[in-house]
Amino acid sequence: MPIYEYQCPSCGEIFDKLMRFSEADQVPVCPHCGEKETQKKITAGAVIGASSGGRSSSVSSAPAPRFT
Ligand SMILES: [Zn+2]
């Protein structure tokens, strides 16, 4: 079971999330500020099944929209 690392674009919090494969497309909320659009970071444990998550990998390369 892969462990994914996420970073919050709002507060910069970095946290690990253990995901079942059935949950791999879900995005966890930031435990620090509640931001819903956290960004998945690539880790060594996330190689398997990485190709199935193309949607979130494209998000990580673009600047997050800010509503201020
Ligand atoms: Zn946050």
Image (cartoon, helix red, strand yellow):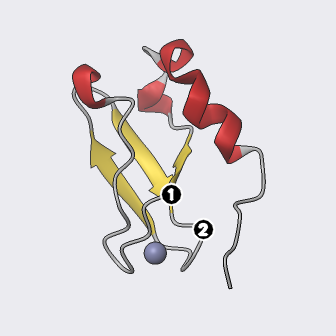
Q: Does the beta carbon of the residue at mark 2 sit less than 8 Å from ligand 1? A: yes
Q: How far apart are the two marked residues, 2 and 1, measured between alpha carbons?
A: 8 Å
Q: Which mark is residue 9?
A: 2
Q: Which mark is residue 46?
A: none
The reply, left or right, for residue 2 in relation to residue 43 is left
Q: Quadrant of residue 10?
A: bottom right
Residue occupying the point 31% across, 71% down: 31
Q: What x and y, as percent, mark residue 43?
A: 51, 37
Q: Look at label 2 and name its amino acid.
A: Pro
Q: Secondary structure at mark 1?
A: loop
The reply, left or right, for residue 62 in relation to residue 37 is right
Name the residue carrying label 1: 37
Q: Look at label 1 and name its amino acid.
A: Glu
Residue occupying the point 56% across, 74% down: 12
Q: Which comes sooner in the sequence, label 2 or label 1?
A: 2
Residue occupying the point 38% across, 67% down: 30
Whether the residues at callouts 2 and 1 have beta carbons within 8 Å, the answer is yes
Residue found at the very far bottom of the displayed protein: 68
- In front: mark 2 or mark 1? 1
Q: What x and y, as percent, mark residue 9?
A: 60, 68
Residue count near mark 1 (Cα–Cα under 10 Å), binned few <14, some 14–19, many ≥20: some
Q: What x and y, as percent, mark residue 29?
A: 35, 61
How many numbered marks appear? 2
Q: Is residue 7 above or below residue 62?
A: below
